[in-house]
Amino acid sequence: MITKNPFVEIVSTGRFLPEHVVTNRDMESIVETTDEWIFERTGIRERRIAPPEMTAADMGTAAARIALERAGLEPADVDVLIVSTATPDRLLPATACDIQALIGATKAVAFDVIGACTGFLYGLTVAEGYISTGRGEIALVIATEKLSAIVDWEDRATCVLFGDGAGAAVLRSSEGERGILGTHHQSDGTLADLLYRPAGGAAIPMDEEVLRNRTHLLRMSGREIFKHAVRAMADSSGKALERSGWELEDVDLVFPHQANIRIIKATARYAGLPMEKVFVNVDRYGNMSSATIPVAMDEAIEEGRLHPGMNLLLVAFGAGLTWGAMTVRW
Ligand SMILES: CC(C)(COP(=O)(O)OP(=O)(O)OC[C@H]1O[C@@H](n2cnc3c(N)ncnc32)[C@H](O)[C@@H]1OP(=O)(O)O)[C@@H](O)C(=O)NCCC(=O)NCCS
C-alpha cells in the first residue's frame, strides 16, 4: 500500500466542447473518405470543430471556470496554473499565461507543458509535485486543444482522426487517502518523426516554401504509432499499478487517451483489462489530444459513474513519443 504525505486529489473537473459537430458524412465532402472507413478503422463517428475565432485559450478558460466553480474557488485562489496544449495560441508566451489573464488567476505561476496527448498526465504530476512539497495549495490543470488548426485538411489519413475541445481539473491536498497514487511516465525522442510538425518552429521558420509544402501541419506514420501506442500504454499501466501496490482486479475504471477504439481495445487486451471497465467516448469527439482524459472524466462524473473510494487508472500516449499512466483513488 502506497503512503503519501499528503495525498493530492482532483477535487473538481470541467469541460468545454465547441458546438459545431462534424460527422463522418460531413468529412466525405472534405476529403476522399467514407463514414464506413473512418468508423471501422477508428470508432469515430463525429468530432467537434471550433470556429476560426475561438482559440485554445478560450476553450481552456471555459473549462477552467467550470472546474473552479465546482470546487467553490475563485481564480485568485489558484497557486499554480498548468496548461497542456499542442496548439498554443501563439508560440510565445505560454497559453497558460493567456488563460491566467482571461480568468484573473492573479497570484498564480502559469506555464505550459508540452507532452502532446500525454500532456494532461504530465500536468497532473507536476501539479501534484507543487502541492505535495508545499509550493502551492491549489493547482489548476487545463488541457486544451484546437487540433483543427494544425491538421492538414487535404490529408485524409490524419484529418479524419482529430477534434477540438478542452478539459480542466482542480487539485489540492487531501485530508484522507484519496488522490494520485502511482505514476509511470516515459518518452522516446528518437521516434519524434512518427508524429510531428516538421516546420514552422525556430529550426525551419515559416516561409512560402513551408506554406506551399504544408510542412507546418501535422504529419503521422499511423501504423507505427498504432504499434508503439498499444505496447507503451500497456507497459505504463502495469508499472503504475505496480507502484501503487494494485493488482489488475483492483482497477474499477480506466480512462485511456481516446485516439482510436482499436488502440483502446488492443491496449486493454494487452494489459489484461476488461473493456467493461474502460471509459470510451472517442465515437463522439475523435482525438482531442491531451484534452481527451479530462473530458472523459468530467463526463463520467456527470453520468454518476465515479464514486468515492473507486480505483481509477489514467493512461495516455502521444507525439514525442510520450506516454504514461497514473492511478487515482477517487
Ligand atoms: C490512421 C489509421 C486509422 C490508418 O489505418 P491503417 O489500417 O493503418 O491504414 P493505412 O494507413 O495502412 O492505409 C490503408 C489505406 O487506407 C487509405 N486511407 C487512409 N486514410 C483514409 C481515409 N480517411 N479514408 C479512406 N481511405 C483512407 C490509405 O491511403 C491506404 O490506401 P492504399 O492502401 O491504397 O495506400 C491507423 O493507422 C491508426 O489509427 N493509427 C494510429 C493513429 C493515432 O491514433 N494517432 C494519434 C496517437 S496519439
Image (cartoon, rainbow, N blue to C red):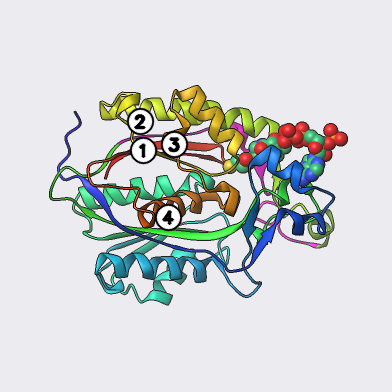
Q: Earlier in the sequence, mark 3 or mark 2?
A: 2
Q: Are marks 3 and 2 in contact (CB under 8 Å)?
A: yes
The amino acid beneath tag 4 is Glu
Quick one: label 1, few (<14), some, or many (20+) residues within 10 Å?
many
**Dot 1 beta carbon under 8 Å from ligand 1:** no
Dot 2 or dot 1: first in sequence order is 2
- Determine if the magenta segment contains residue 192: yes
Distance of label 2 from label 1 (alpha carbons):
6 Å
Q: Quadrant of residue 179?
A: top left
Q: Give me the disc on residue 324.
A: 3
Q: CA distance from mark 4 to mark 3?
A: 22 Å
- Image vertical order of residue 41 relative to residue 286, above or below: above
Write down the residue under mark 2. Answer: 240
Asked whether residue 318 appears in the rendered view, the answer is yes
Residue type, label 2: Ala
Tag in front: 2 or 4: 4
Mark 2 neighbour density, 10 Å: few (under 14) some (14–19) many (20 or more): many
Rounded to the nearest whole Å, what is the CA distance between mark 1 and mark 3?
Answer: 7 Å
x, y percentage for residue 203? 67, 51
Q: Residues within 10 Å of mark 4 (few under 14, many from 20)?
A: some
- Residue 326, labelled with which disc? 1
Q: Which residue is mark 4?
A: 299
Location of residue 311 in the rendering, given as x and y in whole percent from the top left corner: 29, 37
Q: Magenta segment, which residues? A: 182-207
Q: Judge depth for marks 1 and 4 and give the one in front.
A: 4
Q: Are marks 1 and 3 in contact (CB under 8 Å)?
A: yes
Q: Are marks 2 and 1 in contact (CB under 8 Å)?
A: yes
Q: Position of residue 41 (x, y in %)?
A: 69, 38
